[in-house]
Image (tube, rainbow, N blue to C red):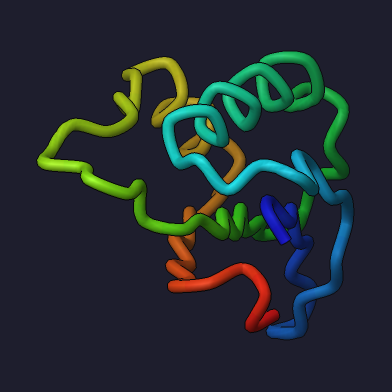
Amino acid sequence: MSIWIRKVTDGNSENYVRLAEESWDLPELFKIFENWLTEHADNLPSGHQWIADIGFTPREGANGGGPILSVQLMKKCTDLGMSIYLSEYNDEDDL
């Protein structure tokens, strides 16, 4: 995985771009996603729905916390019609 941006056309999704192939850390993935979206949102083809499928593994010993979904990120996603899927994997070797 770790982040797939998918374009949805007529109910069918297709992979558009893959980001952060080696990262499974959710806070880091959201930073990468937000940076990518800031750079590329204006150039994404219009007339489609979009999906950001963010695959992550739980942090060992985590007791709370996590990424912040900024208002700017949420607005960009809303403007694009982009849904965010969070795909949790216990072990990245299972993929």
| For residue 36, side relative to residue 91 (left or right) | right
14 and 60: which one is in front?
60
Residue drawn where x is 68% and y is 26% of the image: 37
Residue sitting at the far left: 63
Q: Position of residue 19 (x, y in %)?
A: 79, 42
Residue drawn where x is 48% and y is 67% of the image: 87
Q: Answer above or below: position of 30 versus 55.
A: above
Q: Answer above or below: position of 19 versus 42.
A: below
75 and 63: which one is in front?
63
Q: Position of residue 30 (x, y in %)?
A: 51, 32
| For residue 66, side relative to residue 82 (left or right) | left
| For residue 75, side relative to residue 61 (left or right) | right
Q: Answer above or below: position of 47 versus 22.
A: below
Quarter in which the C terminus is drawn = bottom right
**Numbered marks: total:** 0
| For residue 94, side relative to residue 14 (left or right) | left
Residue drawn where x is 55% and y is 49% of the image: 81
Residue drawn where x is 36% and y is 56% of the image: 58
4 and 10: which one is in front?
4
The image quarter in which residue 74 lies: top left
Quarter in which the N terminus is drawn = bottom right
Q: Answer above or below: position of 85 versus 94.
A: above
Q: Position of residue 34 (x, y in %)?
A: 58, 23
28 and 81: which one is in front?
28
Q: Position of residue 94 (x, y in %)?
A: 63, 83
